[in-house]
Image (tube, coloured by chain):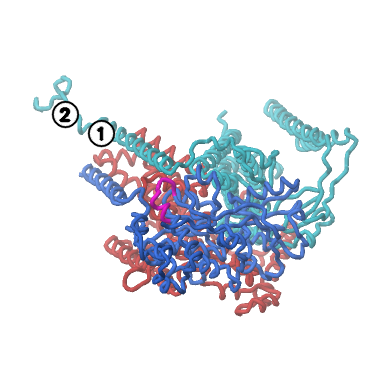
Chain colours: A cyan, B red, C blue
């Protein structure tokens, strides 16, 4: 030990400039400042270039175009829209179409995905092989090829005049799927409200039953009461309105069909393509989820003579969902993003309409920025919703 | 996965997957197909559907199919598939807009490409002294073959490239550019520097939240405006980089998962050897993280191959775009199903090959070979 | 050691970036100079519009607009082949010209006020006058646009047609379902397979679809009448007058050559003509070339290698071509058409 080591003398070490230069915290700070500066500079440089390029060529900028009259029609609209509305509203129509095709796609993909996923772990060898083959095929063909394929199939269906008749209820033609629908009636809105109330009541009742079970240990089977609430309430409302049963049947008229409801070929093709593709991935997620339940748990449940339905409901599902929900979220988000393939086959989704807007206004930067921002919000919102759901199914420490 | 572990719900048939039990064929059938009345009915139903399906495939695809003809009317007269459309149109489908007389260059290019890739995937060749020269030589020769303009070869601009070679180049470019970016982004997200973390998180999450299509729009329509006047970046390159960055954002999350799985002790051990951040990362952390996340990494690489097909939206002539264009021919238009099945088969083949290889690598890792 | 390693790498990267930046900086703003330096004209064309621009099975481009690209190359380089074609979808065409990916757009662009202003374009004189047209199936018995009430109509996004159809139908109180597809192949496929009752495009583009994309061209008819004004013109970026002048005068040169009777066949003899207008056009006298920044015999090269307006028109829309079209408004003003070349002195 010598005095050469200042640290041991109890005096504060004097730091030479060299020490500072080599100190960890100083270097970290320098790196961070350099990185922040580089990012800021790059951003400024790009911004500067865009502004300069646009100004030099007198290209219009800004988001004022959203207020201008669009002057084009859209084939499918969920909200009122005409060529006299603004570009902003046109984009809103596109967003609604994106959301509706995605919602339908998510439902179909989930139903198929869960069925195939359960079949993947079936004890039936044949079924399990079939499910495996399905998964391998739909997952490994590009989704865009699948969408183009279904669009081609539907376009090559017969024309309305020779449409395939579906048991007198509807028609399948190259104009899409046209089917009988109950004629619009005031009762429908009330029935919808009753359905909502029924679901809410059912949830409340099962919750009560669960509390009761947790408090007393007595199990109340809520399956049929819940079904009764959800189905029965709307049925009662329907009867209360005098059971309106007028149904609008489609019939061939002019170029197309009159009456009934029609789902466009583009919607069918896009929905089929993106949901089949996603169903393969969902099936794998479900399989992994089911296999995540340790076998001993099921055996234990069986040994206390729990009914199979309860084993699924109270032992397997809660554990499986915990594994399933997070990856399922990203599948849903990617399905929504895949719906942008609409632009290839002409379904008027956000990207397709954004495309038209970009062309008519020439403001590529702004139009693409709007599209990206909207998708970002939709993706984040979906993740948020699923995260909330995930919190519901996640392990609760008690 | 060759044998799926049985589910907890499928307890009665569990014996079927027990490797210790050797079952007679009859017992196997009983256990796996006819274990109960319900199972038997299910088996019969599935078997019925399958037989109907295969019967149809045989009838349509083989018995009544036309395998070769140059006359579309022959195909039209047949009730089965028209595989002749592939024989007739395979060149524009596989090679796109590339000048017809120069197609031999693409065949040669694909041979070199596949050879290089196969050699690079073979562990025996994992030696930088071999791989670096190999890649330099093959990239150079692929470049010469594709572009031409030297050695008496006709110059072909990238705007005329197309078909399967273009799909291959897009895919390779995506992985080669995307993987390093992914590693950097993943490290950035786990970096001790808050600024680096912030930049990486925003970048990754923003790009993962938007569809690939919008990124391609940016690459094609907006990116040139970011550059000063007169500076140009080749469109094909812009598109490849766009797909690569999208790929990198997904891959970065996978690699981050691998990084998070590495025990603290590894970092501490490295620190006690006074290794620097980059030394620790390169020699200790990354090799383990990449190994851990390998299955997910391969999934995304396969997805990247499928994602190259998105270029149809911006009019690049990859194999899918070329096929849709070919099927525009009014004489052969009717046989679109055959043509799309062919393209699907090409993707399935490469996807299957990649996943087989990935499984092999996992085995190598498990056995400690790599 | 690794510290220096990392620093070295980042310095290298920075140098590379800077190098790439400065190397490419050489040219800016002056398109003509950039074109000369590059050695070829980058011309944005339609990916597949028979008669206007389409690659053959060998990838060689031909068409009416393709020839005007050749004409520009002939004027700049004296060699009509020094041109590269960039196929652009309707969505890509404007960003492509704005960003400098192409030097000139000869891609069925209708000259309109908003494109001239908000899109930052300059339009050369129209080279083709046409209007919105409808292609329908003969079996449907459609004779006029009123018969299309309730029909599904296929169209490309962002085209002027999309707006025109909205106006044409709303003015007549008719309804329709637009099916909007950007990919031209998918668009035509949707009409041909029967997804749409009508396909709408510029009227001049429809005979090409009928001739090349339908199984039996006789089963399809073009609705008579023109429902809108569609002057198709070449477009360049705003803020580069020199280049704009050149494209403009190449266009006029083809009109004037036809008016003066100078054709591809007789241009060499015409060089000896003592008509001062012809002499000026062909660069025998005057200094038009110097004023435009190209060789003085630029117009001679255009007519010799590509032809005058009539040569170009007849090559692609003449009675013998698969896409035969009457010249209608696309005749010289002296014949009752709209083509009026400004005097070239």
Magenta stretch: dominant SS? Answer: helix
Drawn side of residue C94 relative to residue B274, left or right: right
Q: Residue sitting at 28 percent across and 48 percent down?
A: C22
Where does the magenta region start and end? C237-246
Question: Image height check: is C117 above or below C216?
Answer: above
The question of residue C245 being in magenta is answered with yes
- SS for callout 1: helix
Q: Residue sitting at 42 percent across and 69 percent down?
A: B110
Drawn side of residue B14 relative to residue B256, left or right: right
- Whether residues under marks 1 and 2 lie with C-beta atoms below 8 angstroms apart, the answer is no
In depth, the one of C306 and C340 nearer the eye is: C340
Chain letter belonging to callout 2: A
Chain letter belonging to callout 1: A
For disc 1, the marked residue is: A27
Tell me which label, 1 or 2, sits earlier in the chain.
Answer: 2
Question: Image height check: is A397 above or below A267?
Answer: above
| Residue furthest right as drawn | A242
Quadrant the C terminus of chain C occupies: bottom left
Q: Check disc 1: other Cα within 10 Å, few if <14, some if 14-19, many if 20+.
A: few
The question of residue A281 being in magenta is answered with no
Q: Is residue C318 visible?
A: yes
- SS for callout 2: helix
For disc 2, the marked residue is: A17
């Amino acid at each position: 030990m010598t005095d050469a080591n200042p640290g041991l003398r109890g005096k504060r070490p004097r730091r030479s400039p060299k020490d500072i230069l080599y100190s960890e915290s100083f270097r970290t700070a320098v790196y961070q400042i350099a990185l922040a500066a580089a990012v800021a500079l790059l951003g400024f440089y790009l911004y500067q270039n865009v502004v300069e390029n646009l100004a030099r060529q007198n290209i219009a900028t800004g988001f004022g175009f959203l207020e201008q009259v669009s002057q084009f029609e859209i084939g499918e609209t969920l909200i009122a829209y005409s060529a006299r509305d603004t570009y902003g509203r046109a984009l809103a129509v596109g967003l609604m179409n994106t959301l509706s095709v995605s919602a339908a796609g998510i439902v179909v993909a989930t139903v198929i995905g869960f069925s195939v996923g359960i079949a993947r772990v079936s004890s039936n060898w044949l079924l399990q092989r079939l499910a495996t083959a399905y998964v391998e095929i739909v997952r490994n063909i590009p989704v865009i090829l699948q969408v183009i394929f279904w669009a081609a199939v539907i376009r090559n269906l017969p024309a309305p005049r020779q449409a395939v008749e579906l048991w007198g209820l509807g028609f399948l033609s190259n104009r899409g799927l046209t089917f009988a629908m109950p004629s619009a009636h005031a009762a429908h809105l009330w029935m919808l409200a009753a359905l909502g109330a029924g679901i809410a009541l059912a949830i409340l009742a099962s919750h009560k039953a669960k509390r009761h079970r947790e408090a007393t240990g007595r199990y109340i089977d809520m399956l049929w009461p819940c079904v009764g609430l959800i189905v029965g309430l709307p049925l009662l409302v329907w009867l209360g309105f005098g059971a309106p049963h007028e149904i609008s049947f489609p019939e061939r008229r002019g170029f197309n069909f009159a009456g009934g409801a029609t789902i466009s070929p583009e919607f069918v093709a896009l929905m089929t393509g993106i949901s089949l593709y996603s169903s393969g991935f969902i099936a794998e997620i479900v399989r992994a989820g089911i296999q995540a339940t340790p076998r001993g748990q099921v055996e234990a449940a069986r040994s206390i003579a729990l009914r199979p339905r309860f084993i699924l409901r109270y032992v397997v599902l809660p554990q499986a969902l915990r594994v399933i929900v997070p990856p399922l979220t990203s599948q849903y988000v990617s399905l929504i993003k895949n719906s942008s393939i609409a632009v290839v086959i002409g379904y008027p989704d956000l990207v397709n309409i954004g495309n038209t807007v970009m062309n008519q206004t020439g403001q590529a930067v702004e139009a693409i920025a709007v599209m990206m921002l909207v998708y970002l919000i939709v993706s984040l919102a979906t993740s948020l919703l699923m995260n909330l759901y995930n919190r519901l199914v996640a392990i609760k420490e008690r | 996965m060759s044998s799926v572990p049985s589910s907890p719900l499928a307890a009665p048939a569990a014996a079927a997957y027990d490797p210790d039990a050797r079952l007679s064929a009859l017992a196997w059938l009983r256990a796996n197909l006819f274990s109960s009345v319900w199972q038997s009915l299910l088996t019969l139903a599935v078997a019925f559907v399958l037989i109907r399906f295969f019967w149809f495939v045989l009838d349509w695809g083989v018995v009544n199919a036309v395998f070769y003809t140059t006359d579309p009317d022959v195909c039209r007269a047949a009730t089965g598939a028209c595989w002749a459309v592939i024989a007739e149109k395979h060149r524009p489908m596989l090679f796109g807009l590339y000048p017809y007389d120069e197609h031999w260059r693409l065949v040669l290019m694909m041979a070199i490409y596949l050879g290089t890739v196969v050699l690079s995937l073979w562990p025996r060749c994992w030696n930088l002294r071999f791989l670096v020269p190999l890649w330099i030589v093959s990239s150079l020769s692929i470049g010469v073959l594709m572009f031409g303009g030297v050695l008496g070869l006709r110059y072909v601009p990238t705007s005329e490239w197309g078909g399967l070679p273009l799909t291959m180049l897009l895919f390779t470019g995506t992985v080669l550019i995307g993987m390093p970016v992914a590693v950097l982004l993943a490290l950035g997200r786990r970096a001790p520097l808050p600024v680096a973390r912030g930049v990486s998180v925003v970048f990754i999450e923003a790009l993962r939240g938007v569809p690939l299509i919008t990124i391609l729009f940016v690459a094609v329509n907006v990116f040139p405006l970011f550059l000063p006047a007169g500076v140009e970046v080749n469109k094909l390159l812009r598109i490849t980089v766009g797909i690569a960055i999208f790929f990198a954002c997904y891959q970065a999350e996978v690699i981050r998962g691998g990084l998070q799985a590495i025990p603290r002790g590894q970092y501490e051990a490295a620190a006690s050897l006074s290794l620097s951040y980059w030394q620790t990362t390169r020699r200790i952390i990354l090799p383990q993280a990449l190994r851990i996340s390998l299955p997910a990494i391969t999934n995304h690489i396969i997805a990247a191959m499928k994602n190259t097909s998105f270029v149809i939206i911006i009019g690049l002539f990859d194999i899918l775009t070329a096929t849709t264009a070919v099927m525009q021919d009014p004489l052969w238009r009717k046989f679109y199903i055959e043509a799309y099945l062919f393209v699907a088969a090409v993707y399935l083949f490469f996807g299957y090959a990649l996943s087989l290889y990935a499984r092999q690598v996992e085995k190598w890792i498990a056995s400690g070979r790599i | 050691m690794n510290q220096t390693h990392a620093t070295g790498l980042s310095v290298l990267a920075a140098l590379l970036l800077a190098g790439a930046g400065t190397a490419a900086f050489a040219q800016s703003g002056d398109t003509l100079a950039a074109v000369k330096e590059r050695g070829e004209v980058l011309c944005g064309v339609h990916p597949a519009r028979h008669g206007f621009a389409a690659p053959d099975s060998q990838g060689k481009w031909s068409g009416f607009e393709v020839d005007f690209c050749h004409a520009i190359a002939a004027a700049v380089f004296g060699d009509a082949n020094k041109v590269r074609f960039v196929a652009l979808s309707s969505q890509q065409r404007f960003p492509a010209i704005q960003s400098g990916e192409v030097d000139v757009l000869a891609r069925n662009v209708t000259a309109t006020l908003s494109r001239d202003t908000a899109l930052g374009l300059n339009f050369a004189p129209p080279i083709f006058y046409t209007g919105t047209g409808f292609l329908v199936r003969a079996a449907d018995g459609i004779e006029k646009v009123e018969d299309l009430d309730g029909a599904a109509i296929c169209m490309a996004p962002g085209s002027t047609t999309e707006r025109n159809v909205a106006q044409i139908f709303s003015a007549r109180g008719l309804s329709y379902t637009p099916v909007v597809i950007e990919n031209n192949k998918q668009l035509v496929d949707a009409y041909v397979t029967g997804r749409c009752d009508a396909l709408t495009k510029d009227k001049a583009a429809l005979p090409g679809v009928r001739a090349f994309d339908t199984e039996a061209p006789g089963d399809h008819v073009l609705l008579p009448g023109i429902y809108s004004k569609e002057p198709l013109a070449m477009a360049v970026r705003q803020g580069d007058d020199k280049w704009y002048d050149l494209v403009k005068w190449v266009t006029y040169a083809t009109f004037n050559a036809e008016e003066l009777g100078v054709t591809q066949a007789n241009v060499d003899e015409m060089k000896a003509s003592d008509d001062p207008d012809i002499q000026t056009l062909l660069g025998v006298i005057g200094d038009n070339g110097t004023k435009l920044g190209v060789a003085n015999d630029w117009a001679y090269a255009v007519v010799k290698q590509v032809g005058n307006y009539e040569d170009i028109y007849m090559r692609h829309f003449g009675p013998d071509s698969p896409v035969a079209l009457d010249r209608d408004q696309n005749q010289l003003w002296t014949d009752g058409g709209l083509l009026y070349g400004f005097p070239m002195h």
